[in-house]
């Protein structure tokens, strides 16, 4: 079945550091790929998405590129802020509803 | 536009008791989902409704969990009787259509359940 594997956390970075959270997937067909973010005490929010190969999703300074050849959708941000501290979930949807990875907790310290 | 509403936000019960959660999706959204998120894991789909019909309940533990969406708008998820392993956050989400499973889902804040 479809699955998502993302790097385990927690990830701790200093403010203004570069962020990469790795995500790879296994799926039949041509899935759409998503990154969701969960801030403390809040529900999941869609951060960005890409619906086909080579698409780049971007939002709030975060980017991720749909790489079909490596089945990856890594999340990047050039300069993180304390307010980016949250749990980040990679997810896919092809012929099934959303399948999530286990999440990566990011802590950004000033 | 109002988001997905859920209540209660927190619930503590003893094992073997029953509990119910309520969800009101975004207005006009035909599809409603219930997810279970156990601590340290990603959300797992329990059930998907399209209007008032069930599309997928293959991962719903039907011996103790039930859900309904009688008028195709709000929904209730019930656990009876609860077990310790049901301690989790229960998330409700909605999307405009189910025709495309790639449709963006919008999540509510969740109900955090602790079973003692």
Image (cartoon, coloured by chain):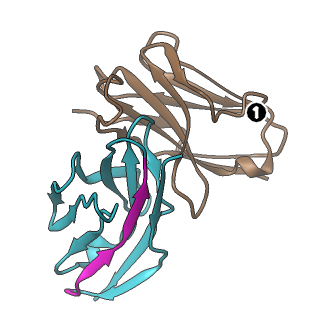
> Which color has been applied to chain B in this rendered view?
brown
Quarter of the image for the N terminus of chain B: give it. Answer: top left
Q: In this view, does A76 lie above or below B54?
A: below
Residue under circle 1?
B18
**Residue A20 forms part of the magenta stretch:** yes
SS at badge 1: loop
Q: Residue at x 47, y 79 (%)?
A: A10
Q: Is residue A20 above or below residue B94?
A: below
Q: Which of A71 and A45 is in front in this view?
A: A71
Which residue lies at the image location 16% right of the left edge and 63% below the top edge?
A: A60
Q: Compared with residue A68, is residue A62 higher up or lower down, i.e. above or below?
A: below
- Chain name for mark 1: B
Query: Residue B50, relative to residue B22: is it above or below?
Result: above
Position in image of residue A57 (x %, y %): 18, 56
Farthest residue in the top direction? B71
Position in image of residue A50 (x %, y %) = 22, 50
Query: Which quadrant of the figure has residue A6?
Result: bottom left
The color chain A is rendered in: cyan
Q: Which residue is drawn at 43% across and 49% down?
A: A27
Q: Which residue is drawn at 28% across and 62% down?
A: A69
- Say which of B113 and A28 sits in front: A28
**Magenta segment boundaries in residue numbering:** A16-27
């Amino acid at each position: 079945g479809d699955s998502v594997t993302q790097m385990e956390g927690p990830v701790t970075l200093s403010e203004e550091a570069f962020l990469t959270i790795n995500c790879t997937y296994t799926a039949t067909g041509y899935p759409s790929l998503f990154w969701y973010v969960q801030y403390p005490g809040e529900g999941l929010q869609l951060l960005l998405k890409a619906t086909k190969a080579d698409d780049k999703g971007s939002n709030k300074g975060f980017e991720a590129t749909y790489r079909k050849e490596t089945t990856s959708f890594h999340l990047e941000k050039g300069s993180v802020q304390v307010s980016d501290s949250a749990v980040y979930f990679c997810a896919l949807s092809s012929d099934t509803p959303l399948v999530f990875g286990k999440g990566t907790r990011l802590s950004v310290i000033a | 536009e109002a988001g997905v509403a859920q209540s209660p936000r927190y619930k503590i019960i003893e094992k073997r008791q029953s509990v119910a959660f309520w969800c009101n999706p975004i207005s006009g959204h035909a599809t409603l989902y219930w997810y279970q998120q156990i601590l340290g894991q990603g959300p797992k789909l329990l059930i998907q409704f399209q209007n008032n019909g069930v599309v997928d309940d293959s991962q719903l533990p039907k011996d103790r969990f039930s859900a309904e969406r009688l008028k195709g708008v709000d929904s209730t998820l019930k656990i009876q009787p609860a077990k310790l392993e049901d301690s989790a956050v229960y998330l409700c989400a909605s999307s405009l259509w189910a025709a495309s499973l790639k449709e963006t889902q919008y999540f509510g804040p969740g109900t955090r359940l602790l079973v003692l």
